């Protein structure tokens, strides 16, 4: 009996020891492993969200970066934390070791040179709709092929144009904030599939930006995609909820269209949405008054021409790009 008891006790002790070892082993496995590497973009996302900007004109530095428009990267660059290489590239997808990450975090801050104010009187705001193949008998003023679109972006870079957002245009004209030379806005109306699948990548890979005027009822289940596109450096503006003309709706419908679209886009981007595009280019006095009251800063029309401050900040003209524009024709339009 005693022997048997002793045996059971030994067994019990053994079992306990075994369990303890097992628990220990699990604990060791559960210690979180640190990532071996992270990309420059991931680092910028980590640091950029919490950075205190000492210079709020950080978007200016898009004009010196060739391969990304990511807003967090622009912020870090403007604060002297990230640097460009000799070709003007940030290399956003470059993998950094932990040592390199620490080196960047500990870096001595040297601010990049701050720009001086030079007045830019006229600014071409290009108007695009679909970037896709023109359907048979389709309206050539509403389409540009993917191939031509890429050629146009390259021609802009080669000719020294600097893409800017509508917010930059506003800050330049209203608050005298410096703007890069040869500024140009690329605006896109409505929010077609090519916006999510093609346009934003072609822009941001070249360090360029554009303004997407979204009709919010067309967004559907692509809110997460739109959030990411915005982070990569694309400005998001409102083109109302359901694309109704200001001329043919009553005041309360107009107010809803302008207000709800703004709020929805602000929920998606996490930032103020301050730029507007009139459906069909139709403007009324009540429309302008409503835009002011809701806190929009600018609005664009479809009337042809370069934008000048004298047109009024809620009535800026644009240059329509046509499917059949040659590269020379395209460059002549924006001269
Ligand atoms: Zn439209």
Image (cartoon, rainbow, N blue to C red):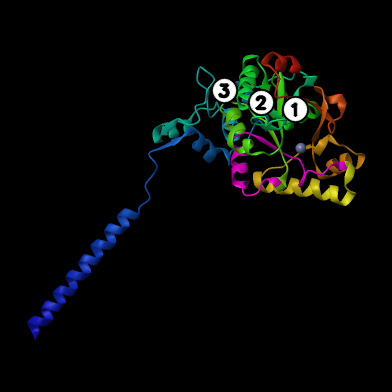
The image quarter in which residue 235 lies:
top right
How far apart are labels 2 and 3 at the CA level? 13 Å
Q: Residues within 10 Å of mark 1 (few under 14, many from 20)?
A: some
- Taking the spot 54% from the left edge, 20% from the top edge, the residue there is 88
Earlier-in-chain disc, 3 versus 1:
3
Q: Residues within 10 Å of mark 2 (few under 14, many from 20)?
A: many
Task: Give the secondary structure at mark 3.
Answer: loop
> Which residue is label 2 attached to?
60
Query: Would you say the beta carbon of the disc 1 residue lies within 8 angstroms of ligand 1?
Result: no
> Which residue is label 3 attached to?
66
Residues drawn in magenta: 218-246
Quadrant where the image shows the N terminus: bottom left
User: Magenta stretch containing residue 144, yes or no?
Assistant: no
Q: Judge left or right: residue 48 versus residue 28.
A: right
Residue 103 in picture, x, y percent from top left: 44, 31
- Taking the spot 76% from the left edge, 40% from the top edge, the residue there is 239
Query: Would you say the beta carbon of the disc 2 residue lies within 8 angstroms of ligand 1?
Result: no
Quadrant where the image shows the C terminus: top right
Q: Judge left or right: residue 8 versus residue 241.
A: left
Earlier-in-chain disc, 2 versus 3:
2
Q: Tell which residue pokes out farthest to the bottom in this image.
A: 1
Q: Which of these two is toward me, 308 or 110?
A: 308
How far apart are labels 3 and 1 at the CA level? 30 Å
Q: Which mark is residue 141?
A: 1
Earlier-in-chain disc, 2 versus 1:
2
User: Magenta stretch containing residue 245, yes or no?
Assistant: yes
Task: Give the secondary structure at mark 2.
Answer: helix
């Amino acid at each position: 009996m005693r022997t048997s008891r002793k045996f059971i006790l030994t067994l019990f002790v053994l079992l306990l020891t075994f369990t303890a070892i097992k628990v220990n082993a699990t604990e060791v496995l559960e210690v979180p492993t640190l990532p071996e590497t992270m990309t420059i973009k991931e680092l910028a996302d980590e640091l950029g969200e919490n950075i205190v900007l000492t210079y709020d004109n950080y978007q200016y530095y898009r004009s010196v970066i060739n391969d990304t428009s990511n807003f967090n990267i622009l912020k870090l660059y403007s604060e002297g934390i990230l640097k460009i290489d000799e070709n003007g590239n940030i290399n956003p997808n470059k993998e950094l070791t932990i040592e390199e990450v620490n080196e960047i975090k500990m870096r001595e801050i040297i601010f990049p040179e701050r720009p001086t104010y030079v007045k830019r009187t006229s600014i071409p705001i290009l108007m695009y709709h679909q970037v896709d193949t023109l359907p048979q008998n389709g309206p050539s003023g509403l389409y540009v092929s993917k191939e031509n679109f890429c050629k146009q972006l390259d021609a802009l870079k080669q000719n020294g144009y600097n893409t800017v957002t509508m917010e930059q245009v506003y800050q330049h004209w209203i608050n005298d904030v410096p703007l890069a030379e040869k500024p140009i806005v690329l605006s896109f109306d409505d929010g077609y599939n090519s916006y999510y699948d093609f346009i934003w990548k072609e822009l941001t890979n070249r360090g360029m930006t554009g303004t997407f005027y979204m009709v919010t009822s067309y967004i559907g289940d692509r809110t997460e995609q739109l959030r990411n596109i915005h982070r990569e450096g694309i400005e998001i503006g409102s083109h109302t909820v359901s694309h109704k003309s200001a001329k043919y709706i009553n005041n309360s419908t107009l107010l809803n269209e302008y207000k709800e679209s703004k709020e929805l886009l602000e929920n998606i981007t996490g930032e103020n949405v301050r730029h507007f595009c009139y459906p069909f280019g139709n403007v009324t006095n009540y429309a302008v008054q409503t835009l002011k009251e809701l806190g929009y800063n600018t609005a664009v029309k479809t009337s042809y021409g370069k934008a000048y401050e004298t047109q009024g900040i809620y009535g800026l003209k644009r240059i329509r790009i046509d499917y059949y524009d040659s590269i020379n024709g395209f460059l002549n339009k924006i001269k």
